[in-house]
């Protein structure tokens, strides 16, 4: 039986005290890893570590600050004696009309997402290169890095930057044995995301109609993908951006709307009628 084995590995998860970061942490420890989680709110990471057990240690760190990241990762290496992977999961986001967005509001998100990811990746990469060790940077982006996205301008711009950072480092640091990949999740209704991005039940009802699989993602599914990428089963996967969204991102393709306006039996009848009309025309 082939299984994902992370025994002996030490993994850092930024924003690991809540939502998807916490879910990935849970999967990593199920696969045998030890995990260092961080966030700005000490009580949140402490409560998560308490609930998840002794393989998880909590740290207070603000990824926007280089000094804070330096202190955090130095302490992780001291505490665990090694560092195998960093997961840049910490993020900020909110809905806003871009013409009303203040420069501070734009910066609040970009500093967490893009600058924070740079800080953690820069520290870990230098550490691995200096010590001649392999390593892995796994960045959590979104499915709108290619398309942009209305009403979440700072997040769209910052996540596109993180995607470019991922691809840049994958090539630049490949000769050192450092991999860099990104996961692009679709909708996973966490408290952090949904409280900021889903206005109310009516909006959600409309949104759910657009999901081709008819459901949201389950955080454990994301955890399994992340664990696989960090494991020794995936040594040749680097420079990849992998969506996990039940095909949600594809709804804009020209004829995909048909699936939303009629049921399949009706569509088949419509297509058949169209075919007959074409046949009659010769
Ligand atoms: C407009 C806003 C705003 C809002 C804050 N600001 N919230 N502007 N609409 N909803 C503006 C403020 O007015 C202020 O500017 C500036 O941003 C800084 O605000 P602070 O509250 O001081 O910022 P800070 O404490 O640094 O908090 C950062 C944050 C916050 C991003 C605003 O929401 C946060 O801490 N988020 C962390 C968790 C999170 O966002 N999780 C969701 C990730 S989900 P002025 O000019 O007024 O001073 C995700 C999913 C993507 O990324 C894809 C989904 C499918
Ligand atoms: P979340 O629970 O709000 O997670 C964000 C985490 O980041 C929190 O634990 C937060 O903790 C931490 N954080 C924020 N600013 C930080 C900072 N400056 N320094 C350190 N930590 C910081 O939201 P989530 O839904 O799980 O999102 C996790 C990741 O998935 C994000 O990268 C998000 O963009 C991505 N994503 C989510 C979805 C979705 O549908 N949920 C879809 C696509 C992508 P503190 O506030 O305590 O610092």
Image (cartoon, grey):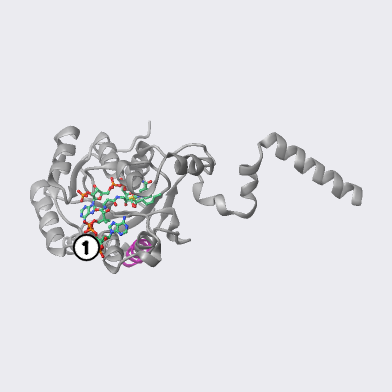
In the displayed structure image, the side of residue 209 where residue 55 appears, left or right: left
Residue nearest the viewer, comparing 156 with 222: 156
Residue 34, image quadrant = top left
Label the magenta part by its dominant secondary structure. Answer: helix
Q: Residue at x 23, y 49 (%)?
A: 15
Mark 1 sits near ligand 2, with its Cβ under 8 Å away: no
Task: Tell me if residue 281 comes above or below residue 17 in the rendering.
Answer: below
- In this view, the residue in front, 35 or 17, is 17
Q: Secondary structure at mark 1?
A: helix
Left or right of 243 on screen, residue 282 = right
Q: Residue at x 23, y 62 (%)?
A: 125
According to the picture, the residue beneath numbered tag 1 turns out to be 119
Residue 282 in sight in this render: no
Q: Is residue 206 magenta?
A: no
Identify the residue shown where x is 30% and y is 45%: 192
Tell me if mark 1 has few (under 14), some (14-19) or many (20+) residues whose alpha carbon lies within 10 angstroms of its own. many
Residue 108's spot in the image, x, y percent? Answer: 26, 62
Please state the quadrant of the image where ligand 1 appears.
bottom left
Q: What is the x, y in percent for residue 131?
A: 16, 60
Residue 43 lies left or right of residue 6; in this view the side is left
What stretch of residues is rendered in magenta?
162-172
Q: Is residue 58 visible?
A: yes
199 is higher (above) or lower (below) than 2 = below
| Residue at x 13% of width, y 40% of height | 46
Residue sitting farthest toward the top: 1
The residue nearer to you, when weighing 184 against 188, is 188
């Amino acid at each position: 039986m082939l299984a994902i084995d992370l025994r002996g590995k030490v993994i850092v998860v930024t924003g690991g005290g809540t939502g998807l970061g916490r879910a990935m942490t849970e999967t990593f420890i199920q696969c045998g890893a030890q995990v260092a989680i961080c966030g700005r709110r000490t009580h949140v990471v402490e409560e998560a570590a308490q609930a998840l057990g002794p393989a998880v240690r909590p740290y207070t760190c603000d990824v926007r600050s280089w000094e804070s990241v330096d202190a955090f990762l130095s302490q992780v290496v001291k505490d665990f004696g090694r560092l195998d992977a960093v997961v840049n999961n910490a993020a900020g986001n909110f809905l806003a009309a871009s013409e009303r967005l203040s420069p501070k509001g734009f910066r609040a998100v970009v500093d967490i997402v893009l600058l924070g990811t740079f800080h953690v990746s820069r520290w870990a990469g230098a550490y691995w290169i200096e010590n001649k060790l392999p390593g892995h940077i796994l960045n959590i982006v979104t499915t709108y890095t290619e398309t942009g996205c209305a009403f979440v301008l700072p997040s769209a711009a910052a996540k596109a930057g993180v995607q470019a950072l991922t691809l840049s480092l994958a090539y630049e640091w490949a000769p050192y044995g450092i991999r860099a990949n990104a996961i692009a999740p679709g909708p996973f209704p966490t408290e952090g995301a949904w409280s900021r991005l889903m206005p109310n039940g009516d909006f959600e009802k409309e949104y759910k109609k657009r999901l081709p699989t008819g459901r949201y993602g389950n955080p454990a599914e994301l955890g399994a993908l992340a664990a696989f990428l960090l494991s020794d089963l995936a040594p040749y996967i680097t420079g990849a951006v992998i969506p996990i969204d039940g095909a949600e991102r594809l709804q804009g393709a020209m004829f995909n709307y048909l699936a939303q306006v009629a049921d399949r039996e009706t569509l088949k009848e419509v297509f058949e009628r169209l075919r007959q009309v074409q046949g009659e025309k010769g």
